[in-house]
Image: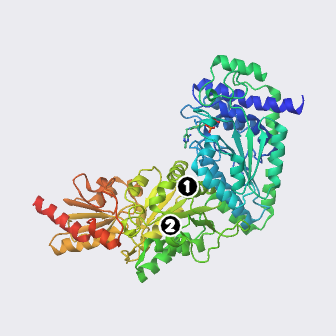
Amino acid sequence: MTDLVKHQRMANAIRALAMDAVEKANSGHPGLPMGAADIATVLFSRFLKFDPTEPNWPDRDRFVLSAGHGSMLLYSLLHLLGVEEMTMTELENFRQLGSKTPGHPENFVTTGIETTTGPLGQGLGNAVGMAMAERLLAAEFGDDIVDHRTYVIASDGDLMEGISHESISIAGHLKLSKLIVFYDDNHITIDGPTSLSETGDQVARFEAAGWNASRIDGHNPDEIAAAVEAAHKSDRPTMIACRTTIGFGAPTKAGTAGSHGSPLGAEEIAGARKQLGWDYPPFEIPSDVRDSWRIAGLMASQVRKDWEKHLGSIDAEKRAEFERRIRGDLPAGFDETIADYKKKLSADKPKVATRKASEMALDVINAAVPETIGGSADLSPSNNTRSKGMVAVTPEDFSGRYIHWGIREHGMASAMNGMALHRGVIPYSGTFMVFSDYARPAIRLAALMGNRVVFVMTHDSIGLGEDGPTHQPVEQLAALRAIPNLLVFRPADVVETAECWQLSLERRTGPSLLALTRQNLPTVRAVFEDNNRCSRGAYELAPADGDADVSIFASGSEVEIALEAKAQIEAAGHKARVVSVPCFELFEEQSEDYQADILGTAPVKVAIEAAIRQGWDRFIGNRGVFIGMDRFGASGPYKELYAKFGITAEAAAKAALDRLAALA
Ligand SMILES: Cc1ncc(C[n+]2csc(CCOP(=O)(O)OP(=O)(O)O)c2C)c(N)n1
């Protein structure tokens, strides 16, 4: 058998599995796996450093199928290479509940899947982050420990999405030469030919962004291999535009949108079998093809073993540090570091904005936790994300720990996901909170995947003042709290900010977001307490003297206002308590007793937050008093804005006293 025939049979195995699994599931996308099978076969059988017996080996090459709808490509590859978990039964159960073969690839469901893709463009963004993490760790631990590539298959849709612009431009700028993107240039999307909506030149576009780019026949294995070899020698990231035929092999649907996202049908499949010379029943792989794939699966095994041996031979301390990083454990003594810092804060009682408090916390954290990688979408001096002594990463030197992301919120958040998925680093980065909307699709995926990333969102309300309503978040807090598995923290002072940072870093199961102020706030936690009070999501900051008539709930900058309102209510002869609510989600995790205790039994309940009411009825009920925003803000000095929108201690105290009078 010639090499070409062998290659074609290996690729046809992918095609057959994809069309048969989609047919059996009666839904799915056969076109991309059939079209990209040659690219994947060359990559996985000749180049990819991936050991199916150790799919999570730290120095493996990463492979990202950005066009996640083509998931059967990945599942077929994992099966054929011999990943134990990916049995033929799993392929037969494609898209069924509880299978390892969900509609789109989910890294938290299936071993060997590097990231969750489906929302087009995100995989490409993740891959940029993976390639960055590789460079960062190589700069720290050496090329003998960290030296791998990141490969992507991206579709027309991936490259049409706006996020692709942000991702390829930062990758080009940083000269991520170990990032290699195969563009599945099949000229087809769902609505039909790409000519319906695209006239651009992707090769020229990537070149303009500082990439090395070329065009090849995506069904010619020699051209594919030669392009990969050239990419390995490049000093820039590489894009290989592979001209392919979607649904390759299908007699009437190949090259048409008809093969993109629906089962081909029995007749078409029979025709494809004939055309491909694939004579075998569904879900049956002939032994010669199985052997070829298994041999491909063994390719990296020796490399992996050699790497492990080498890791075992290096300085024990360095090895332990590398292994700690990959496991994701924080350095020993982290809790004490934070406790000592809190003690100092409670003694000093600084009056600073929580964005500044965050910078102060980062001075302590970044000195103690070497794996944090900071950054900002061009708002470093506003987000206060660059702590003392942090050196910026440059294209030539990745030994720094600070990323200038440029004005690319979406690409930044998506790359942060990739960095977290890579493991070994903990990314955090900032922008203005109102622009969390620009990063939201990636924030949602961080939550879905359970990635440890920290989003630093400053200028969290009308409290930012003069920049006006375009920059003043109003609905973002509620919108972010609506994302499952995202912890949204809104600390009230320096101490809470330190505690929220501690919780964010200690959390291994998902992302955290810190909503931070521009305006200064007093220290409300003046008495040192070792335990992390924010860990319960809400806690009684200022108790009433006896049974409370009024419970006031507030977060962030409005806790100060709540404390003043309490004093005014007391001056009027009533008893009030203040509950600080730094994190809704953590409050929901507390016991029913704790929650009941915090909600309390005061006849009047007030919530204060300079944002919309949505979500606060959980604390105050639908008859509670809400002091906040019900429209967009305005441009002006922040104190005047608080007065204009009625978010003041006077307004809160008056509303509470009026309510008490009405009840009397
Ligand atoms: C952000 C986003 N928008 C829309 C979709 C729905 N969708 C899935 S595939 C696709 C486009 C298909 O074209 P292409 O990317 O070229 O894939 P191919 O047809 O080659 O399989 C669309 C619009 C999506 N998955 N993600």
Location of mark 2 (residue): 502
**Residue 446 x, y percent position in the rendering:** 54, 52
The residue lying at 41 percent from left, 52 percent from top is: 479
Tell me the element at label 1.
Answer: helix
Above or below for 633 versus 518:
above
Residue with the most extreme right position: 2
Q: Residue 308 falls in which quadrant of the image?
A: bottom right
Q: Is residue 647 visible?
A: no
Q: Residue 118 falls in which quadrant of the image?
A: top right
**Which three-letter amino acid code belongs to the residue tagged 1?**
His
In screen coordinates, is 185 left or right of 302? Answer: left
Q: Residues within 10 Å of mark 2 (few under 14, many from 20)?
A: many
Residue with the most extreme front position: 199
**Residue 631 x, y percent position in the rendering:** 31, 57
Quadrant assignment for ligand 1: top right
Location of mark 1 (residue): 410
- Mark 2, ligand 1, within 8 Å: the answer is no
Above or below for 402 versus 273:
below
Tell me the element at label 2.
Answer: helix
Residue with the most extreme left position: 664
